[in-house]
Amino acid sequence: MIELTHEPIDPGRVIESVRSHQAGAICLFLGTVREFTGERQTRSLAYEAYTAMAEARLTDLEAEARARWPIVALSIVHRVGDLELGDIAVAVAVSTPHRGEGFAACQWLMDTLKQVVPIWKQEVWADGTREWVHPGLDPSNAPPFES
Amino acid sequence: MRLSIQLFALARDKAGRSVVPLELPDGANVADLRAALAAGVPALAPLVPVLLIAVDSEYARDEVVLRPESQVAAFPPVSGGTAGGVA
């Protein structure tokens, strides 16, 4: 299941979507909205996606993960729109025969998603100011593809 | 050829609009598009060298040649996750 949604993410539904008799393990990662980044206080976050491309890149990530690990089922759900503190922004769930490959696949999926899937977040700080989070704006950063 | 460039996140905010129409010569590539974008939208010019360009939902290097039917988007690097908010 690959999904971008404006609705709150239900982790139970994500887990159910990958449960299988073929799997001995389900690894679930949830990214949640954190209040403090160092000294700075977050009031809320806004996520924006380039939907068509995000879905295409997520589908590619699923295919690449399936080629690397013996994945039984895989789900990635990403929230878009305005999120409050503690809300689930992203859920990645992988079911595999054994836990080792599940942990590895789940970590790789989440790390890679944050580099290549066109979804951006904007911090709304406690003082009301807004700031896009684009850590790769330094021109020395490598682009998200093989060169 | 006339292309409509979709902008996202900081790029859209800097440009003040979400779509920029650009007139490009036939055979133009992504590098030509960057130059036209910087010239056509001066507020975006400082950002143009680091914007990512997507053509038909794929990241595109500067040498990729554009076609009249290409779906083109320009946007800053994705959130990356290091600066805060989630995880």
Image (tube, coloured by chain):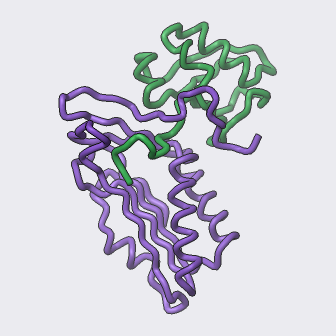
Chain colours: A purple, B green
Question: How far across and down, in percent of the image, does residue A104 sit?
Answer: 57, 70
The furthest residue to the bottom:
A21
Specify the quadrant that holds the C terminus of chain A. Answer: top right
Question: From the viewer's perspective, is A108 left or right of A147?
Answer: left
Question: How far across and down, in percent of the image, does residue B9 sit?
Answer: 43, 30
Question: How far across and down, in percent of the image, does residue A145 sit?
Answer: 69, 43
Q: As rendered, which of A69 and A119 lies closer to the eye?
A: A69
Compared with A129, A111 (above or below) is below
Question: From the viewer's perspective, is B72 left or right of B76?
Answer: right
Q: As rendered, which of A5 and B76 lies closer to the eye?
A: B76
The furthest residue to the left:
A127
- Residue in the image at 45% along x and 65% along y: A92
Question: From the viewer's perspective, is B5 left or right of B14?
Answer: right
Q: As rendered, which of A21 and B50 lies closer to the eye?
A: B50
Residue A113: tell me if it is visible. Answer: yes
Question: How far across and down, in percent of the image, does residue A71 sit?
Answer: 59, 77
- Residue in the image at 56% along x and 46% along y: A115
- Residue in the image at 32% along x and 51% along y: A6
Number of numbered tags placed on the structure image: 0
Compared with B65, A30 (above or below) is below
Question: From the viewer's perspective, is B75 left or right of B29?
Answer: left
- Residue in the image at 44% along x and 59% along y: A3
Residue B13: which quarter of the image?
A: top left
Compared with A68, A42 (above or below) is above
The furthest residue to the front:
A39
Compared with A140, A26 (above or below) is below
Residue A49: tell me if it is visible. Answer: no
Q: As rendered, which of B67 and A10 lies closer to the eye?
A: A10
